[in-house]
Amino acid sequence: MINIRRNIFKASFFLGLVLFLSGCASYNDMIASYYKQIAAGNYTEAVKELDKNKLLQKPRNKLLFLMEKGKASHLSGDYENSNRYFNEADQLLENGIGGAMDAVVGTLVNPMTQSYKGEDFEKFMIHYYKALNYVYLGLNEDAIVEARRITLQSQEQGDKFNDKDSRYSKDAFSLMLQGLIYEQDGDINNAFIAYRNAAEVYLNSKDQTYYGVKIPAELKQDVLRMADRNGFTAELSRFEALFGMKYQAEPKPEGGELIFFWENGLAPVKKQEELFFSLIKGSNGDLFFTNLGGTIIIPFNHTYSNSNFSLNGVESLRATYPKYQAQPPHYSSATLSNGTQTVSFEKAEDINELAFKTLDQRFVKEMGKVLTRLAVKKSAEYALRQSAKGNGKDGKDNSLLEGLGIGMQLYSLLSEKADTRNWQSLPANISYTRIPLKKGENTLTLDLKGAGGNSDSKTITVNGTGKLQFYNYSTLR
């Protein structure tokens, strides 16, 4: 009997050890070879790393694979294949990811085993890259369709929350992009509506700042210019008052204008954080979790519990939760020159800020699910151990139940793992500027400056056609 117990304990221990060792690595660690290539600008090699990465080939990570494949293909200039991957990702999101069984797996094991459903800002970024791909391919009608889908995405996102003022319910950058696409197409009415909607997101936010981005001066000019071109005198006056500026119409440049998007740095990565809680019964009989300092109070979620649930055995809980870790970008500022005029960039999207704040916003809801799941597991472990003791009283061998109890305890402890997945090739932030072009060939110089005083420059050639054009450049390090 002693040998049986010893063998059961060893088996449980080694099972736990395997789970522990496999659970230590974060998602970032497991795709490190791809991440290294994308950060170094070796996009062709990055695509190869994606294709041979076993983790990303798993069905539960299909959305991540498609988004990374779409981004890597975009960076390498393969816009057609890029949109093929992004369209598949889009379709996956529209059809719905996961289901009842997916939720069960996540409950029994950990969120990392569930299908990845994407962060809200990641879904908006799919539209950004798809729209640029269509423009670069000369498929302007498709770019317009993508612009319209931004409105649908905004409505869907807004419907998720009642408290929309403090939640990420709209993406101001996507609305600005929508306006730019409409303006390029000559649809000045819809361009005004999109610019106005973007501006109002900022105006309705504290200090006219939305998730780390202050309302761009360029956006103010866009709103005023489109109001003027549409003959909306009342709207022009209203926004002049709101912006505290007077609009001065300027002649359109002969060669048109270039909207230059600068994608700088890399999005933050997710690491695992450990937190400890206790389950307590309040004076009114309600159950709630609290951390050691009593600074966090989370209601017990009865979704996972049943009539057999008992507080017995649930003294303390070790929970895991993802925590973002920012990656300081190599470059801190940039300017763009056309030879006669130099313009600065304005931040349009701060993915760092979005990542940190949106994760924080859902902490209470998601941690409530995690803690309740852990409490139910602990309650089941306690019941199993009690059964083992009961069997021992009548002289029967309780080694199996004892071993199962130990195994279940180790499994619950060591299988607990936070979901550290995210779309990691996204930039830390996106800045933009508008620069006039002359008719014919234009040589533009992008000057990049690092925090340490180092600088680099890139020269690009653009043919001035008299129309509005787009260009995006990435410094992913």
Image (cartoon, helix red, strand yellow):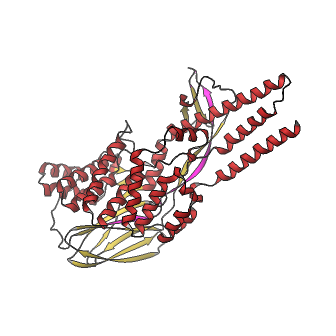
Q: Quadrant of residue 308?
A: top right
The image shows residue 393 at horizontal and vertical percentages of: 83, 22
Residue found at x 46% / y 66%: 476
Residue found at x 30% / y 53%: 175
- Up-down: is 372 above or below 467? above
Residue farthest along the top direction in this orientation: 284
Q: Is residue 69 magenta?
A: no
Magenta-colored segment: predominant secondary structure: strand
Which span of residues is magenta-colored? 259-286
- Up-down: is 441 above or below 106? below
Quadrant containing the N terminus is top right
190 vs 30, left or right, is: left
20 vs 198, left or right, is: right
35 vs 276, left or right, is: left
Q: Is residue 282 magenta?
A: yes
| Residue 125 in sight here | no
| Residue 472 in sight here | yes
Residue found at x 55% / y 33%: 297
The image shows residue 30 at horizontal and vertical percentages of: 59, 58
The image shows residue 438 at horizontal and vertical percentages of: 21, 76
Image mark count = 0
Residue found at x 77% / y 32%: 401
The image shows residue 55 at horizontal and vertical percentages of: 57, 56
